[in-house]
Amino acid sequence: MHQNTHQSLTTDCRFCSLVSKANGEDPIGTAGASDYWLIMEIPQPWPEEIYYENPTIKALISLFQEVEEQGINIRPMLIAPDSEYSHPGFTRVLYYYRPAKLFFQFEKQEFVVPEQKATVLVTAILKQLMQQPNDLSQFHEYEQQTSHIRELMVCTHAQVDLACGRFGNPIYRRLRKEYAPLSQGKLRVWQTNHFGGHQFAPTLADFPQGCFWGHLEPEVLNLLVNRDDSVFGLRQFYRGWAGLSKFEQIAEREIWMQLGWTWLHYLKVGQLLAIEEVAQGEEDDADWAEVRIDFTVPGSNESGAYEARVEVCGQVMVALNSAKEMELKAVKQYHVSRLVKI
């Protein structure tokens, strides 16, 4: 018995998310910030380099690069077809976009198109983003009216990192079997490929809100789905909101903790006021930053702003992946040293 316990512990230590959790890494500030999300149904299994190995996606890579070269911030994601939600011979495409400068959740267009038209549709969406001639009207018959549906997407992409398979799958199954059926069609739960941060497995994206979560435990799923108790119960699992950059995300969590659930519905926009001078490309590693988050309360004339100073408060050692020979790296941890409403 003792030997087996010891064996399972050494095996478990191979998982980067357990190292991250054991060393107290705070996931805040690690949500992928983006204005656009393009999410496509692609059947599993997903190899590690799925974007380069799957013929459907491979055909779109150069177009994605073209979009990014124009300074348009777009993130691709894949979801696995679901026996209940999906239709054989058809491909689902979810397109989330930032609707305005100040916003609280992404707008969505959803299409379920014949498989052979999926690449044509994605091409048209990307061209529309670059303001190039395209014709989305040919896809109107395939558009789905699903803006009322909340989508929870759990990374289970074990081929990229074992932790996502080991810890993502049980969370996915629980949400899919217990919570989705009770939602009367208002909640769908999907398996996704890797969207960054496997050391936070199980990690989850919550759309249309655009909130990201990590280190999830089964006992917090109720609060995450139903939002029926104190927001403090989710503080340590929050990776941030995709509508803000790293230091803005760190400040935003503190505002949320003060105001509670209503804050999630405020329209908001972030701004970096000042940051420690560092080498170009190293901004995310700065020791301090000052940010401002402007907000408007929907349906009222109330608006305002918060200013915050975010400072480094230590560092923890984390494993970058779940390899046998784990490479450990020091990662800075931050806290909000000043937060004022102005």
Image: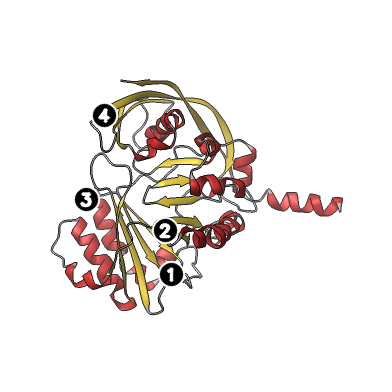
Q: Are marks 4 and 3 in contact (CB under 8 Å)?
A: no
Q: Earlier in the sequence, mark 2 or mark 3?
A: 3
Q: Distance from label 2 to label 3 (Cα)?
A: 36 Å
Give percent across and percent down for residue 78: 41, 62
Question: Could you tell me the amino acid type at mark 2?
Answer: Lys
Question: Could you tell me the amino acid type at mark 3?
Answer: Gln
Q: Is residue 82 visible?
A: yes
Give percent across and percent down for residue 224: 51, 46
**Residue placed under numbered mark 1 in the picture:** 85
Q: Distance from label 3 to label 1 (Cα)?
A: 35 Å
Observer-nearest of 245 and 257: 257
Q: Which mark is residue 302?
A: 4
Q: Are marks 2 and 3 in contact (CB under 8 Å)?
A: no
**Residue placed under numbered mark 2 in the picture:** 186
Give percent across and percent down for residue 148: 35, 56
Give percent across and percent down for residue 171: 57, 55
